[in-house]
Amino acid sequence: MVRIVEVGPRDGLQNEAVPVSTELKLQFIRALVEAGLNEIEVGSFVSPKWVPQLADTAELFAALVQATSHKPQATSYSALVPNMKGLERALECGVNRIALFTAASDAFTQKNINMTVAESLVVFAQVTDAFRAERPDGHVRAYVSTAFECPYAGKIEPAATAKVARILEDDIAVDEISLGDTIGVAVPKEVETLHEHVALYVPQSKIAWHFHDTRGTAIANVAKAVELDYRAFDSSAGGLGGCPYAPGAGGNLATEDLVYFLERSGIETGVNLEKLARASLPVLAALGRAPDSRAQVAALAG
């Protein structure tokens, strides 16, 4: 069985200029749950000034909590938390799973969050400690972007990514680390090399892979990671979420493509591909975009 962390409602929508209504986002999330996805990143408690598309994250959580208050919680909802202020808002909404963001490149973190990697890790530790004080049973995920290459600094040495992972594991003790191929350049050999470095410090069971399909290598990279015995992957329904550093290029690995590949390979996902293929259609329509995930198009045609 493979874990799929669905990031479409957050990572898939955060860079979209066309506003997507709260009700449409809720419809999207409910359709993802109906398709069998049980780990969904709902939004981010970042300042609405910087990411207006995610300004309704508190409203989304309120609606989702209300909808599940009378029945067992089978789905895990999480949110990105950028700092202590964001954590305060997340805790007010009853969030029990948070994600934090850093990278393996100072150039990238300075551009995105105005901190060096080291400074971001200090904030990570503060937010994690405060979160655990309030939510002892909570879950902390750490994103390490630019794990292979940075759009500003170029190729990243595997040892540099492994160093960040080691600090997250040993000093901050996060529950999970998601290694991100932010601009979608990695190939299977590089996945294997990074594995060799990171596995020295972090158990494989605590690693998830976040591949982008900018150059069409995401599924090949998943295949290599599976071969190496990894069982957790991030993806975005409908392939939502382009790559802002490669205009016109694809971005997030489509959940449909991931599910098709895994199931066809004999690896259970628990996801109904036909339902999944329809889940993102209303959002894609609102964005004025046709489906372009290969597996999604094929499922819809069938």
Image (tube, rainbow, N blue to C red):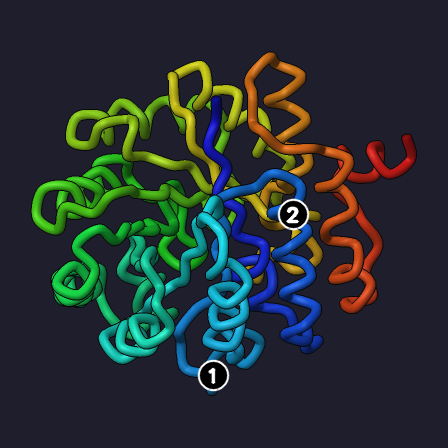
Q: Tag 1: Cα neighbours inside 10 Å, few (<14), some, or many (≥20)?
A: few
Q: Callout 2, which amino acid?
A: Ala
Q: Secondary structure at mark 2?
A: helix
Q: In the displayed image of the protein, which residue is found farthest to the bottom?
A: 49
Taking the spot 17% from the left edge, 26% from the top edge, the residue there is 200
Taking the spot 57% from the left edge, 60% from the top edge, the residue there is 9
Q: Earlier in the sequence, mark 2 or mark 1?
A: 1
Q: Callout 1, which amino acid?
A: Pro
Quadrant of the rendering where the C terminus is positioned = top right
Q: In the displayed image of the protein, which residue is found farthest to the right?
A: 301
Q: Where's residue 219, x and y in %?
A: 59, 29
131 relative to 207 in the view: left or right: left
The residue that label 1 is drawn on is 48
The residue that label 2 is drawn on is 237
Q: Where's residue 183, x and y in %?
A: 51, 49
Q: Where's residue 26, x and y in %?
A: 63, 65
Q: Secondary structure at mark 1?
A: loop
